[in-house]
Image: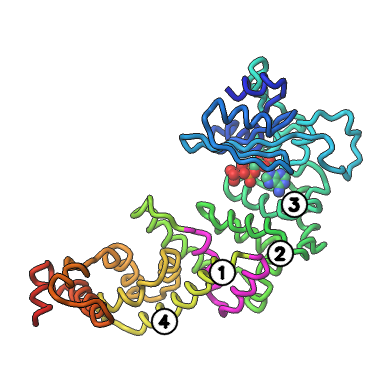
Amino acid sequence: KIGLAADELQFNAFAVGGFVRDLLLKKNNLDLDIVIEGDGIQFAKNLARKLQGRIKTHERFGTAMIMLPDGTKIDVATARLEYYEYPAALPTVELSSIKLDLYRRDFTINAMAIQLNPEHFGTLIDFFNCQNDLNQRSIKVLHNLSFVEDPSRIFRAIRFEARMAFEIAPHTRRLMHNAVSMQLFGKTDDPRFFSELKQILSEEDPVPAIRRLAEFNLFPFLWPELKPHLKVDRRFLHILHQAQRAISWFRLLYLDEPCHNWMVYLLAIMSRSPDEVLTAFCSRFQIPQKIADRLIWQKTHAEKTANLLSRREIIANSEIYWLLKELSIEGLLYLMALARKNQVKKAASNYVTALRYIRTDLTGDDLMALGYRPGPEFKMILNDLLDARLDDRVHNREEEIALLHR
Ligand code: ATP
């Protein structure tokens, strides 16, 4: 259907980028990126109509996003010759739009296309010997100025290398080192940096990539405030591994409950620093205020609570409940990662697996029916009932009523 929608308008349509890479690697990738030689928006409207999808367009960039009823996402872009001024002074006339589009991409492994028009359906377009790099599991830029053009690609190289167990090619590695030493990162207001870092911290196992960030000397850029103890030392790695264990544990138990893993890792990275370091990080990378506030609150609260719990051998369920209640899943997992004593980890896991679900049988409506009136005391009664329930002093509605009358 995609090819037909393009043929109708006499445009060439190509699948590009990560989709092609993963297809050749026989990996699943549900996000389809399409490049159109022609008017991408007109094509996207035509395709959305055919597939009964919803469409969002960005006229200025000639891009569109189609959401299909089954949740599949299709990104459409327009390949345009005049898109960029090229540093390498290429004779642009010789380049087809798709060739230039692919040349502008980050790495060769992401710079292949597959034609979708029916007549040539499935033809692999590979101008830069990309398939060879993919087979060699090698990450290479397309030209020497790639990182100058967009330093966020450094993060992408590290992410792909770690995720797919590829290797950044020696020349590309040199260009990365050069870019870092040229301090191309001076301009930190580029939201792409944080977005790429977030993606690294969202990977299944971000630890190798974090080590790589340190090897490429990116820590002073990411968190300059951490300078005095910047090293990726044993304790630093230990807490990252603890974060990873906590996340895997949670994933196994609660497959469907959303958790922003990157937040847990970011908190773990910042665990040995005061709140101000996290605050500075958030403002430098322009993290939306709401998320920044949430991160900082979780950090403070989780650390305080871990400290408190570590000083108590025996602690009632009700106390654990009220101490941990305000923490988000990310905060709870961070607390587990921080915990040096078993009792702290136990308390947190008890809260996550059991205590947070416990409810009283009696509700506010029941209390009203029994003659109580809403107000501060009313809330206290409900909380007392919940405490009794958490601490196993009552087990059902009758026992709760009996407790009320005591
Ligand atoms: P993932 O599987 O992580 O989504 P992806 O390759 O699909 O990987 P995206 O960030 O979705 O990554 O980008 C889609 C495509 O856009 C890439 O394959 C690449 O060709 C191109 N691209 C993305 N970011 C850049 C960039 N900073 N510079 C050049 N090309 C980029």
Please tell me whether residue 329 belongs to the stretch shown in magenta: no
Q: Is mark 4 within 8 Å of ligand 1?
A: no
Crowding near the residue tagged with mark 2, few <14, some 14–19, many ≥20 C-alpha atoms within 10 Å: some
User: Gap in Å between the C-alphas at discs 3 and 4?
Assistant: 42 Å
Q: Amino acid at mark 3?
A: Arg
Dot 2 falls on a residue whose secondary structure is: loop
> Range of the magenta residues?
260-286
Mark 1 near mark 4, Cβ–Cβ under 8 Å? no
Residue 404 in picture, x, y percent from top left = 12, 78
The CA span between labels 1 and 4 is 23 Å
Residue at point 66% right, 34% down?
16
Relative image position of residue 287 (x, y in whole percent): 61, 65
First of labels 3, 4 by sequence position: 3
Q: Which residue is mark 2?
A: 217
Mark positioned earlier in the residue sequence (2 or 3): 3
Under mark 4, the amino acid is Asn
Label of residue 292 in the image: 1
Front tag of 3 and 1: 1
> Which residue lies under the disc numbered 4?
307
Q: Is residue 22 above or below residue 236?
A: above
